[in-house]
Amino acid sequence: MSKHFEYGAENRWHDQYFEKGVTLPDSSGVVCANALAVGQHHGALAVTLVADGAVSIPAAKKLTVSVQGSDTENGVFADVASAPEMSVSGGADAAAVFADGEVIGKLVLPDMADYARIKLTTDGAATGKVDVFLNYPAR
């Protein structure tokens, strides 16, 4: 995957990762280590998940991405009730498989508290690692 600003590239800022190399969790979920400043951005920011090595989501199972917010970087983070969630599913009969560097999905952040963290949960035995970063959708 290209890391340059060019047509079709993932446009992101340097080092704006919620976390790199997050191992996909079991059903208990995992919250990415880094809080990033997002604030009131009027729909200009998105979260992108990219496979870090091979990723597999078993048939009839899903990976869910949700948003948590806080008014301070080191504050208590809670689920943002008005935020959309993104789910990526394996098919009815086959797993969803993503190659290293392949985009798994994007989620546009709502206007929200000043800081965001991203929570990943699965309802099955998804395998692999992902990079979760902040970027902006084309306008």
Image (cartoon, rainbow, N blue to C red):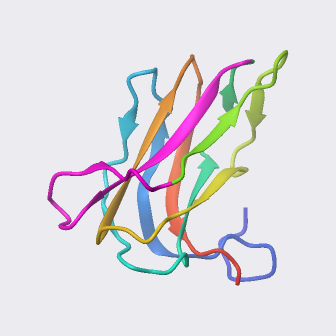
Q: Which residues are magenta?
A: 60-83
Where residue 121 sits: x, y (%)?
47, 32
Pick the front one: 20 or 125 = 125
Pick the front one: 49 or 101 = 49
Was residue 3 drawn as part of the magenta stretch in this picture? no
Where residue 76 sits: x, y (%)?
16, 52
Q: What residue is rendered at 46% in x and 21% in y?
A: 26
Q: Is residue 96 left or right of residue 116?
A: right
In the rendered image, the vertical position of residue 47 relative to residue 90, given as above or below: below
Q: What residue is rendered at 53% in x and 52% in y?
A: 84
Q: What residue is rendered at 54% in x and 20% in y?
A: 123
Residue 46 visible, this orientation:
yes
Where residue 116 sits: x, y (%)?
35, 61
Residue 54 visible, this orientation:
no
Pick the front one: 79 or 45 = 79
Quadrant occupied by the N terminus: bottom right
Q: What residue is rendered at 70% in x and 45% in y?
A: 100
In the rendered image, the vertical position of residue 41 relative to residue 31, given as above or below: below
Q: Is residue 55 left or right of residue 83?
A: right
Where residue 91 sits: x, y (%)?
81, 24
Was residue 70 drawn as part of the magenta stretch in this picture? yes
Tally of marks = 0
Quadrant occupied by the C terminus: bottom right
In this view, which residue lies farthest toward the front?
Answer: 82
Residue 31, image quadrant: top left
Q: Is residue 106 left or right of residue 29?
A: right
In this view, which residue lies farthest toward the left?
Answer: 75
